């Protein structure tokens, strides 16, 4: 499975998307991530594990806490995947524009 597939699959779950969005602005500890979510802290930890395996987040220790933050590698894999569609769309647009000139 490609990096982009893993990333998109991981974000297919609404709770994981919420977690990922919480990490968009700044790194957070699990207690801060779990705050306000409709799932238990152990469930949040399981979602974080999936996001980590998909390379969407990184974990580093700060004292006794694990701090989670967005991993640019996973985001870049998704962006590269989507850019292929954009490149194809632009190429098709160029072809149509050139045909209309003739």
Image: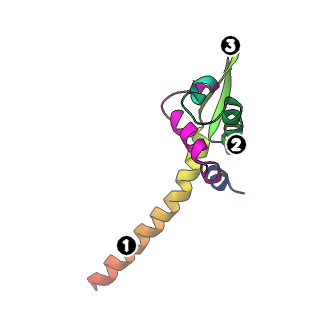
Q: Secondary structure at mark 3?
A: loop
Residue behind mark 3: 63
Q: Is residue 15 magenta?
A: yes
- The magenta span reads 8-30
Q: Is residue 27 magenta?
A: yes
**What residue sits 28% from the left and 86% below the top?**
102
What crowding class fits label 3: few (fewer than 14 Cα within 10 Å), some (14-19), or many (20 or more)?
A: few
**What residue sits 57% from the left and 24% below the top?**
32
**What residue sits 46% from the left and 64% below the top?**
87
Quadrant hosting residue 91: bottom left
Ranked by sequence position, the earlier of labels 1 and 2 is 2
Ranked by sequence position, the earlier of labels 3 and 1 is 3
**Distance in Å between CA atoms under marks 1 and 2:** 38 Å
**Distance in Å between CA atoms under marks 3 and 2:** 24 Å
- Which of discs 3 and 1 lies nearer the camera? The answer is 3
Q: Which mark is residue 50?
A: 2
Residue 84: where, in percent of width, then height?
A: 52, 62
**Distance in Å between CA atoms under marks 3 and 1:** 54 Å
Residue behind mark 1: 93
Q: Residue furthest top?
A: 63
- Which of discs 1 and 2 lies nearer the camera? The answer is 2
Quick one: quadrant of the N terminus? bottom right
Frontmost residue, 45 versus 61: 45
């Amino acid at each position: 499975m490609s990096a982009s597939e893993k990333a998109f699959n991981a974000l297919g779950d609404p709770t994981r998307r919420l977690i990922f969005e919480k990490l968009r602005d700044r790194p957070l500890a699990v207690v801060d991530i779990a705050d306000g979510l409709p799932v238990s802290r152990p469930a949040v930890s399981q979602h974080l594990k999936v996001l980590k395996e998909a390379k969407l987040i990184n974990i580093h220790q700060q004292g006794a806490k694990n701090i989670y933050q967005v991993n640019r590698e996973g985001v870049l894999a998704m962006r590269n995947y989507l850019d292929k569609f954009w490149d194809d769309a632009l190429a098709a647009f160029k072809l149509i524009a050139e045909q209309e000139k003739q």
